[in-house]
Amino acid sequence: MTTELSQAKGATDVPLIEQTLGDFFDDMARRQPDREALVSVHEGKRFSYLELERESRRLASALLKLDLVPGDRVGIWSHNNAAWVLMQLATAKVGLILVNINPAYRTAELEYALNKVACKALVTMKRFKTSDYAGMLRELAPELANCDPGQLQSVRLPHLRTIAWIDADGDDEALAGMMRFSDLLASGDAADESVTATQRTLKATDPINIQFTSGTTGFPKGATLTHRNILNNGFFIGECMRLTPEDRLCIPVPLYHCFGMVLGNLAVLTHGGTIVYPNDGFDPLTVLQTVQDEKCTGLHGVPTMFIAELDHPRFAEFDLRALRTGIMAGSPCPTEVMKRVVDQMHLGEITIAYGMTETSPVSCQSSTDTPLDKRVSTVGTVQPHLEVKIIDPETGRVVPRGTSGELCTRGYSVMHGYWEDEEKTREAIDEERWMHTGDLATMDAEGYVNIVGRIKDLVIRGGENIYPREIEEFLYRHPKIQDVQVVGLPDKRYGEELCAWIIPKPGQTLAADEVRDFCKGQIAHYKVPKYIEFVTEFPMTVTGKIQKFKIREAMKSRLALQEERTA
C-alpha cells in the first residue's frame, strides 16, 4: 500500500476570468447600475455601481491628463476611504500600476518605496492621528514649497511629479506644491474617449499592483501582481464565502494590504455586493456600530480585531444578527477565539483564509459549510485552479500526509515577480513556478491544510522540535488569558527555550506560576515556557500581524541572551 503524499489540486469546473479588472467592473456596473456598491461610513459617502463606475472613469481620465501612460506607477498612501477604491479601479482601467504604500511608513521607508518603483504620482492622506504625511513629504521634497502642483522636481524623489492629498468636504487648507484630490477628480471627464481607447489595449496578464512585503530583514520587496492574479483570487474568495449581490461586507482591515484590497474589495465587487468601510483606521466600537446600522452580512478581521470587538465593554449592546460570513486571516486563528466569533457574533459561516502577498494572496480557504472542527483547526483546502504541495525543506521531496514540511503553491495566483529583482524572484519561485512560502504545514487525509509555523519560527529545544502555535493554542484555553504569543530564545544548555508573552483578560490578574501549573500534566514538560511575561500589547504591523522577531529581540536584550553559534 502506497502512502498518500501531501499534494492537492483545486477544482477547475468554474473557469478563470480572463478580463481585465476595469472591463469586469464595467460589466458588473451595467448589470446592476442602481445597486449600492460602496458605503464609507466615516466620510458619509455612498455610491451605486453606476456612480462608482463613473467616478472611477473620471479619475482615470484625470490620471491620463497628468501624462501618465500604461505601466507607469502611481502610489496610494492612505488608510481606508472612498478615494482608495476609486484609485484601485481608475488605475486598473488605464493600465497604471497602483503602488500600495504602508500608512505606517516614515520618511526613509517612503523614500525607498517611491524610488524603488519610480512612482510618478502619489495620492496621500494629509495626516492621520500622529502621522503627518504632508509633513514627511515636505521633508523629503522641500522643493514642494516653490513648485506648481504636478511640476515637482525633487532631488531625493527624482521620479515623482504629482502629489494629490485627500481632502474632506469643507477642508479649505492649501498645501504648497500639492493638489487636492477633489480637484484632481474634477479635472477628469467621465466621457473621455481616451479612457476607453486605453482600456482596450490592456491584457489580463499586465501588472496592475505592487505591494511591499513587510520584510523582517533587509529592504521590503515589491511583489508585482496582475489583473489576472487579483481579480480571480478575489472572485474565488467570494465564492468560498457564497457572496451574492445581497451581501454587505464590513471591511475594517487596511486596504493597502491584500486582505482589504482583494479579500475585501474584489471579493465583493466580483459578486455585485456592497463594500462598507466603518472607519479609516481600526476601531472596535465603530465596527460594531457599523455592522448594526448597515446590517452587514459579512465581517473581515485578523484575530486581534475580533478579540477587541468581543471584549469591548459595550459588545452586548449591539445587534449583530445580520452577520453570516466573513474571513479571519492574517495570522493564526486561535481555536477559542473562533468559537466565540461563531457563538457570540452570529458568524456561523465565517471562513479561514491562508495566503501571502506573493500569491495574490489566498492559496487555501475553508468554505461556509466546512465542519466547525476543521474550520478551527485548519486553513481549509486548496483554492480552485491552484495546486499546493508540502515538501521536505532539505530534500525538496513531497512529504507523506500528516508530515510537516514547507508549503508551496502553483497556479494563476503566483505573482508576476518582485519588481526589478530577478535574484529574489528566483529564490522565491522555482523553475517549475512553485512559490515557496516559508511556512511549515501539514495536510490531512481529506486535503485540509494546517499551518504549524514559519520555518524560521520553529523552536528546537534539546533536539525536540516545538511549534509555538501548538503552545499558543493550549494557553488560549486558560480562562484568564486573552492573547498569547510564544517564541524561542537562545539557551546555552538546550539551544533554545520557550518564552510566552501573555495579555490577561480585562480585570484579571495572573501569575507565571499559575500558567505553569495550568500546563503541568497537560503538555510535555519541554513545551512549558521557561520565560513568561505579562504585557498589554504585542508589537505588530498595521495589518495586525504579530512581529515575533521584535518580541524575541526585546527579550534577548532584557535577559542579555546571546545567540548560540553553530559551526
Image (cartoon, rainbow, N blue to C red):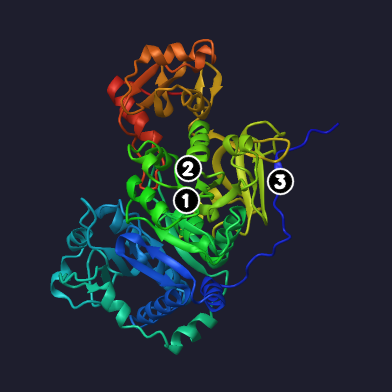
Give, as a three-letter code, the residue at label 3. Answer: Ala
Circle 1 sits on which residue? 299
Could you tell me residue 173's position as x and y percent?
Answer: 15, 69
Element type where label 1 sits in the image: strand
Query: What is the three-letter code of the residue carrying label 1?
Result: Leu
The answer to whether the residues at label 1 and label 2 have Cβ atoms under 8 Å apart is: yes
Q: Secondary structure at mark 3?
A: strand
**Left or right of residue 220: residue 23:** right
| Disc 3 versus disc 2: nearer the observer | 2
Q: Check the image and report above or below for 193 versus 207.
A: below
Task: Give me the C-alpha separation between circle 1 and circle 3.
Answer: 29 Å
Amino acid type at circle 2 is Met
Give coordinates of residue 163: x percent, y percent: 26, 70
Mark 3 lies on residue = 8
Q: Which corner quadrant of the image does residue 558 belong to? A: top left
Label 2 Cα neighbours within 10 Å, binned few <14 / some 14-19 / many ≥20? many
Task: Tell me the distance, in whole angstroms, between the alpha carbons under discs 3 and 2.
Answer: 33 Å
Residue 82 in view (yes/no): yes
Q: Quadrant of the N terminus?
A: top right
Badge 3 or badge 2: first in the primary sequence: 3
Task: For mark 2, give the secondary structure.
Answer: loop
Q: Position of residue 57 (x, y in %)?
A: 42, 79
